[in-house]
Amino acid sequence: MKKVLMFFMVFVFMTLSADEPVSPYDIPDKPEMEICSCVEEAGYYDPDEPFFITVVIANFGEEVLENVKISLMPGVECVIYLPQTSEISKRDSFSENHKWEKVPDSFSQENKIAEIFPFTENFKIADALVPCQNESSNCENIMIRFQHHVFGACPKFFAQFQAVIADDTGRQYKTNSSVPLKIKPGTSENSDCYIAPQDQCGGHSFTRPEEISDEDDTKDDDIAENADSENRKTDGCSILIL
């Protein structure tokens, strides 16, 4: 009798699990949220350097999703957001190059000067998101990325991130199938890397022409070097603790 009852309970559990709908935002065989850092090993960051967090949003369901929004859940207190590093890219297929656009920081109502991470709560990323046919073609998708840093005094343990995606259906989806992205401190083998390279984290923020002169190329290098230098000067007084 006990064996029959146990078999019945297992059958009911498996049936309910099978009937549970899969979220359209659940990308097959790929995490929606990832870290991109100077450390080559997945899931690790260099404690001394900034890193990117990336989130991909696509519709693998059967119906058009409307009024799509994202909210990023804060990590631990020692993780800080670097102002003016938030970007968004919308493309028609996963094989298409990203076209990045800056996302302005919002501002605190109490302190008009303090810059606030823009994706904190219900940031609208699309009026509508059509279903994907497959992962390689005719699949509209959106990626957001932003830079974070860890305080030097931060304990050497993992930090974790999670985003919530929602739409007019009222259903919510937590990235990576509700498992928070856990990142751990590691060591970069590249001594020249002091910020995660953009070309490995979704591509550069600007679109380069196919033909470019040596003089213009030198100017671009100078602009990038100056921008990186300014990022290095960012201190804890001008950044938001998430």
Image: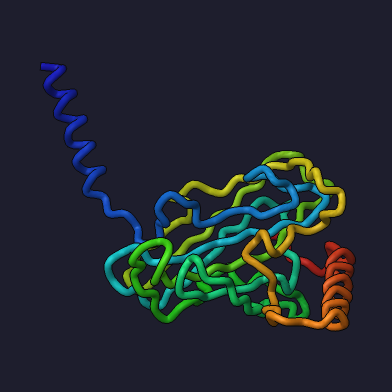
Tell me how many marks there are: 0
Name the foreground residue: 31 vs 159.
31
Q: Is residue 102 left or right of residue 173?
A: right
Residue visible at 39% across and 71% down in the picture:
138
Residue 63 rendering spot, x and y as whole percentages: 28, 71
Residue 61, by quadrant, is: bottom left
Task: Using the image, determine if residue 14 lies above or below residue 71.
Answer: above
Residue 56 rendering spot, x and y as whole percentages: 51, 63
Residue 41 rendering spot, x and y as whole percentages: 67, 43
Task: Using the image, determine if residue 162 lies above or below residue 215.
Answer: above
Instruction: Residue 167: tell me if it is visible.
Output: yes
Residue visible at 86% across and 53% down in the picture:
192
Which quadrant of the rendered structure holds the C terminus? Answer: bottom right
Residue 117, by quadrant, is: bottom right
Residue visible at 41% across and 78% down in the picture:
67
Residue 98, by quadrant, is: bottom right
Task: Using the image, determine if residue 84 lies above or below residue 60.
Answer: below
Q: Is residue 199 left or right of residue 72?
A: right
Instruction: Residue 107: tell me if it is visible.
Output: no
Q: Is residue 226 left or right of residue 124?
A: right
Residue visible at 85% across and 79% down in the picture:
214
Name the foreground residue: 152 vs 64.
64
By what rule are the colours in the image chosen?
A: rainbow
Which quadrant of the rendered structure holds the N terminus? Answer: top left
Residue 97 rendering spot, x and y as whole percentages: 57, 71
